Amino acid sequence: MEAASRLIREKGVAEVGIIDVMQSIGLTQGGFYKQFASKSALVDEAIAKGLADNIRYLVSLDEHAGDHEAAWRSLVESYLSVDHRDDPGAGCPTAGFAGDTARHPEHRGTFAVGVQEMAAWIEPGDAGLAALATLVGGILLARATSGTDMSTRILTAAGEAATRSVGGRHAAGDAQVATASPPDAV
């Protein structure tokens, strides 16, 4: 599941075949069908695993930071970083699976659960959804404009907007583009 989750976030569902996933873990394609009925079943489980790992990561931020406000600042800094922008395979499954889920409606229910859980961790209600949409939209636009000055401006602006959307947990001017690499699930 980890290999499938990473490959799909990195390349997209259409570009990742069963053989790619199996070769990445040193197994043959024949072993796949003992575990999964179809590629769609694999994708759904990879999405579910990636999103569940992400929630565990967010909970660990609270534990390590000592309070939710510090954890939130840590998330914004690592999420809207150059390293996260440049490594989608190890990045946030919400951003990594969004485009494919939009094109493959059979995975939307699984994806929606993960989106709701991440938004609720940020802040209950619509403020959490707005902040999550800002983070995900920011990282996707930054990736799409990577190599231009616009990319860095997007990361900075998204950080400022995300902090404002949850009641300004810290001053909007404090959001900066970071280069620290986020863990596998961001």
Image (cartoon, rainbow, N blue to C red):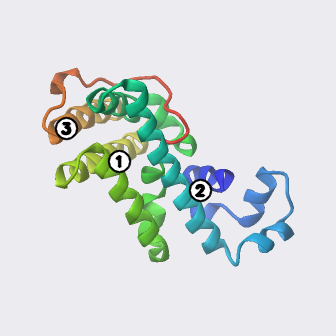
Numbered tag placed on residue 136 in the rendering: 1
The residue nearer to you, when weighing 96 against 108, is 108
Q: Is residue 182 above or below residue 110?
A: above
Q: CA distance from mark 2 to mark 3?
A: 28 Å
Q: Are marks 1 and 3 in contact (CB under 8 Å)?
A: no
The residue at 19%/38% (across/down) is 161
Q: Secondary structure at mark 3?
A: helix
Numbered tag placed on residue 104 in the rendering: none
Report the residue marked by disc 2.
8
Q: Secondary structure at mark 1?
A: helix
Q: CA distance from mark 1 to mark 3?
A: 12 Å
Q: Position of residue 14 (x, y in %)?
A: 59, 66
Res 176 → quadrant: top left
Res 30 → quadrant: bottom right
Question: Which mark sits nearer the N-terminus, 2 or 3?
Answer: 2
Q: Are marks 1 and 2 in contact (CB under 8 Å)?
A: no
Left of 25 or right of it: where is 80? left
Report the residue marked by disc 3.
161
Q: Position of residue 79 (x, y in %)?
A: 39, 35
Q: Position of residue 98 (x, y in %)?
A: 42, 59
